[in-house]
Amino acid sequence: MTGARRRLTAAQATVRYLVAQQVDGHGGPVPYFAGCWAIFGHGNVAGLGEALQASQDVLPTYRAHNEQGMAHAAIAYAKQARRRRAMVCTTSIGPGATNMVTAAALAHVNRLPVLFLPGDVYASRRPDPVLQQIEDFGDGTVSANDCFRPVSRYFDRLTRPEQILDALPKAMAILTDPAACGPVTLAFCQDVQAEAWDYPEDFFAPRLWRIRRAPADPYDLADLVVRIRAARRPLIIAGGGVLYAGAETLLADLAAATGIPVAETQAGKGALTWDHPCNLGAIGVTGTGVANAAAAQADLVIGIGTRLQDFTTGSRALFQGTERTLVQVNVSAHDAAKQGAVGVVGDAAAVLAGLAPLLAGWRVPADWARSLAAPALAWDEAWQAATAAPKDGGAALPTDAQVLGAVWRQAAPDAVVVCAAGGLPGELHKLWRVRRPGGYHVEYGYSCMGYEIAGGLGVKLAEPEREVHVLVGDGSYLMMNSEIATAVMLGLSLTITVLDNRGFGCINRLQRATGGAPFNNLLADTRHTALPAIDFAAHAASLGAQATKVADIAGLEAVLAQARTGGGVHVIVIDTDPAVSTPAGGAWWDVAVPEVSERPSVRAARAAYDEKTKDQR
Ligand SMILES: Cc1ncc(C[n+]2csc(CCOP(=O)(O)OP(=O)(O)O)c2C)c(N)n1
Ligand SMILES: [Mg+2]
């Protein structure tokens, strides 16, 4: 043995290593891990729990109420921090661990870094079967944590204390790699957490990680420049990769200099502020009229940092230009090659910085910009009509769009809006006007009900100086609201607007659009003997929030204005119309309709569906 050694438990050594990992925080190194979320049980309380307790001043531990919720908060933190920093989540074995699997899938789909340390069964197997242990009749190596394998970018099971010397650097490599980035799961056997080993001191030396900004191959860049210069109707699709690369200013400058219009995906929304002259707004199924009009005509579509999911491409029926070429600028070769694209593998910021001098003096053909002026104006009118406060003073129930308009009018310029599932993400994508980059945080990769409130908490931890507005449907609220109590405990300021349309409004609309009968979505359409009249305000108040139910949009704006001055967790409840979403804009979405049915409306919907699928590339 050479060099100094230190005798620690595997859990103590792990925590020590995590504390030593740093990133450049614009003005000096900051810890890469901002904290550890923990819900203890027999799988981690004695091992990791003891180690975390001793390290509270260098790695804060946060106690949540639900493992999925705390993982959502951790993931939201990383998303809002643009993947430059992350958090750790530790649980007991069994149910605590599997409660995080959904969140792991969410991080996997959205390419977001998070370190999961679920406890695992005994490596020694001496006390087997332990409480909560899955017993596989045919495989002695299986535990509940194997559920994490398909939803982790890196999975490992720690069965000996010295394995962390290998596993932890590998975990860091994945978390900080722009292309491979995603959740890491280190299933930590309960007995191993407590086992001591003589670790080399230098394993715990401070380590500065730099998020690589890989430039593109010069040939690929030159080829892209040739294509742009030859294009008559180019269009940029800005995805989440623009924000994760910190490339929003480079994109704003390149768009302004060249006049290339830009449309935004859900993850990319807010890359440009809403009033940038080249910003056409949202693209795709929940896109603006003007962006989708541009998409239909574009001869060169340049995706930057986008996964091209179906909502972006209108299920591959949106970019209909007969001679159109698709270019995919992406850090990941996997994404760059999608849908037959010409790939430019590289970081969004590096590629945009590389393009700028090569396109100096070049501008898009003037007729392209001119042709988009009328649809832009029409879209602005549609926006006004959808988001304005109701003129009748609120005789009818407000729409989601009207609520969104009210929140937007009352929100601070630097506010962040948080959402994930239901009808709201579509409305927000179309209608929310982002005033500052990073002001739009909608998890629409996994679109996971229950992300909203816990996610808002993570956003607030990541950017405490910004006002955070969570918009959440009644369905999502009921699925996961317990982290309201966590936000209260932590003294955070958070404004949560609950839109109560008494059920799963958007799925009810989708059901009807596919010819289905209203069934099992709105509460009124479910098997029941009594309809619950859920008092969301009373519920939120019981968790410690300052809660109010408002009668209309004017009432909502008044309470929002008050909430801004006071701080703390505010929950504002408003009844909304389940039947209405914004008709303007939008594009087709492929949702397979039954080929045979007794219902004439289903047969009609299938006929329309068969027609639309002909547009798919
Ligand atoms: C965890 C989870 N379960 C199911 C779904 C499918 N789903 C998407 S939206 C939705 C209904 C959401 O209801 P609510 O939050 O009230 O919003 P609304 O549709 O009424 O706007 C459902 C069931 C989902 N996205 N996530
Ligand atoms: Mg609802």
Image (tube, rainbow, N blue to C red):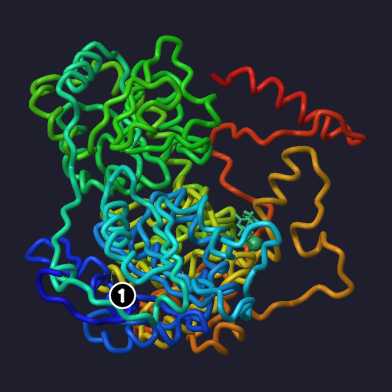
Residue 288's quadrant in the figure? top left
> Which of 275 and 389 lies nearest the eye of the viewer?
275
Estimate the x, y position of residue 58 in percent, counting from the top left: 22, 81
Estimate the x, y position of residue 3 in percent, counting from the top left: 9, 71
Residue at the image point whose x is 29% and y is 30% from the top: 329
Residue 258's quadrant in the figure? top left
Q: As drawn, is 80 to the left or to the right of 526?
A: left
Q: Which residue is mark 1?
A: 35
Estimate the x, y position of residue 600 in percent, counting from the top left: 88, 32
Residue at the image point whose x is 44% and y is 70% from the top: 188
Q: Quadrant of the N terminus?
A: bottom left
Q: Outermost residue, right direction?
A: 598
SS at mark 1 in the image: strand
- Can residue 31 be seen in this snapshot? yes
- Can residue 556 be seen in this snapshot? no
Residue 206 vertical position relative to residue 444 in the rendered view, above or below: below
Q: Outermost residue, front direction?
A: 1
Q: Quadrant of the C terminus?
A: top right
Estimate the x, y position of residue 117 in percent, counting from the top left: 42, 69
Residue 330 vertical position relative to residue 417 in the rendered view, above or below: above
> Which of 498 and 267 lies nearest the eye of the viewer?
267
